[in-house]
Amino acid sequence: MAIDLIIHSANQVLTLAGDAPKRGKTQGELAIIPHGAVAISGEKIIAVGDTLDVLALADASTRKIDARGKIVLPGFVDAHTHVVFAGDRTSEFDARLRGATYLDIQKAGGGIMSTVRATRAATREALIAETRARLDAMFAHGTTTVEVKTGYGLETATELKMLAVIAALAADRAPDLVPTFLGAHVVPAEFHGRPDDYVRLVIEEMLPAVRNAPFATRHLACDVFCDDGAFTLAQTRHILTRARDLGMGLRVHADEFANLGAASLAAELGAASADHLMVTPRAEMRALARANVTATLLPGTTFGLGKTNFADGRAFVEENVPVALASDFNPGTCWCESMPFILALACRYEKLTPAEALVGVTLNAAYALGIADRVGSLAPGKLADVLIANVPEYTHLAYRFGANPIETVIKRGRVG
Ligand code: NIG
Ligand code: FE
C-alpha cells in the first residue's frame, strides 16, 4: 500500500494505545513512543512506531514532515458542545459581572431562551455560516471531532433545522461532527407553567421526528438538562427512558448547579456519559464507575460563569470513573474554542495531571461518543486525525495557556 505521508522524528508520539476507556490508575496512560513516527495512507493511519522503522516504509512519493523537537498526538475530540446557535449573550455577561446569576437571568426570560429566539429567527444559511466560523477556530486549536447538541429550537421544526445545519456542516469534514438531540434543554416560554405538556411534546412529537430525520445518523443520542430551572429528575427519567426505547444513546447534563440525582439516573439507564458533575457526591461517582458511564467534565463552564466550584476530577479518577473533558462551547456560559485551554483549567482546578487530562480530550472522549473504533488514539486502521504541537513534551500543553500550541492539524490524512 502506498504511504502518502510520514510524520517523523517527534520527541514524543502520544499513541494512547488501548482498547478500553482509561480510568483510575490507567487514566493517565499515554503510551508514548520517543523519537516516534506515524505513517498515513489515504484517510487512515498505517503504522505508528520508532522513526527508523516507520521511515523504512516510505516510497518515492511519500511526503515527509519532520517533527523534530515537537510532539505528535491524536486530534482532540470535543465531546460536549452547543456550537450551533445565532447571536451572542454579551449583555448577560455584563449583567453577571454586576451580580446577576445565571438562574436570575434565565427566570427573567433571558439565558437559553434568548438564544432560542435568535436561533428560531435565523435562516439555515445564517446558522451554517456563523457556526462554520466557530468550527474553523476549534479546528485550528486541534479539535478534529465535535459533538454538537440541538436545544436552541425547543419546537420540532427548529430542532430539525438545527440537525440539518449539523448535517450540512458535517459534510465539510473539518472537523467531523456527532449530533445529539437536546430538545429538553429548558421549558420554552410558551409552555410556562405547564412543563409536563412540553415533556409530552418532546416524547410524542420530537423524539420520533428527529429519529426519522434523513440526516439523523446512527449516532444520534438524546441529552436532557436535569437541573434547577430546567428539568426535574422524574421528567428526565421519562424522556431518557423513551429515547432509550427508541435505541438512542443517552447523555445527561447533571449536577451543574444542583444535585438532583441525575448522575445516578445516568448510571441506572446505562447512559454513555454524564456531563458537568460540579456538585456530585462520591456515592454517585461510584454508581457511574459501576455502570461504566464516562464523566465528561467541563471546566470552561465553571470558569466562564466566574465560579470556583470546579468538578472534583481527582475524586472521579480515585473512584475509577473514566473521565473525559470537553469545552461545552455555548453562548451563555462558555465561548471557548480552545481544548488546550480546557486542559490548562482541568489540571489547575480539577486536579488532573496533564497526562490524565490528555486522555480525557482524546480516547475517553471518543468512547463517550461511541466512536473510539475510529478516533481518539494513534493506531493502525484508525482515522488519520493527527496533531503536531510545537512543544518539546506533552506536559507543556497544560502548563502553558492562552496561546495556541497546535502547529499542524491533519484531518483524515489531509494536512490542514
Ligand atoms: O451546558 N447547562 C445547560 N446548557 C449549557 C448552557 C447553555 C446556554 O446557556 O446557552 C451548559 O452550560
Ligand atoms: Fe452543555
Image (tube, helix red, strand yellow):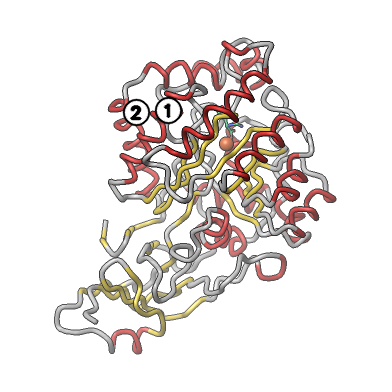
x and y percentages locating residue 188 in the rendered image: 57, 17
Question: Is residue 271 positioned above or below 211 on the image?
Answer: below
Q: Quadrant for ligand 1?
A: top right
Which residue sits at x=57%, y=62%? 359
Marks 2 and 1 in Cβ contact (< 8 Å) = yes
Closer to the camera, 57 or 284?
Answer: 284
Closer to the camera, 275 or 98?
Answer: 275
Question: Is residue 218 positioned above or below 71 on the image?
Answer: above
Q: Which mark is residue 127?
A: 2
Q: Is residue 385 left or right of residue 129?
A: right
Q: Is residue 40 left or right of residue 269?
A: left
Q: Secondary structure at mark 1?
A: loop
Q: Is residue 98 left or right of residue 164?
A: right
x and y percentages locating residue 145 in the rendered image: 42, 52
Which residue is labeled 1 in the image?
85
Closer to the camera, 347 or 210?
Answer: 210
x and y percentages locating residue 103 in the rendered image: 67, 20
Q: Is mark 1 within 8 Å of ligand 1?
A: yes
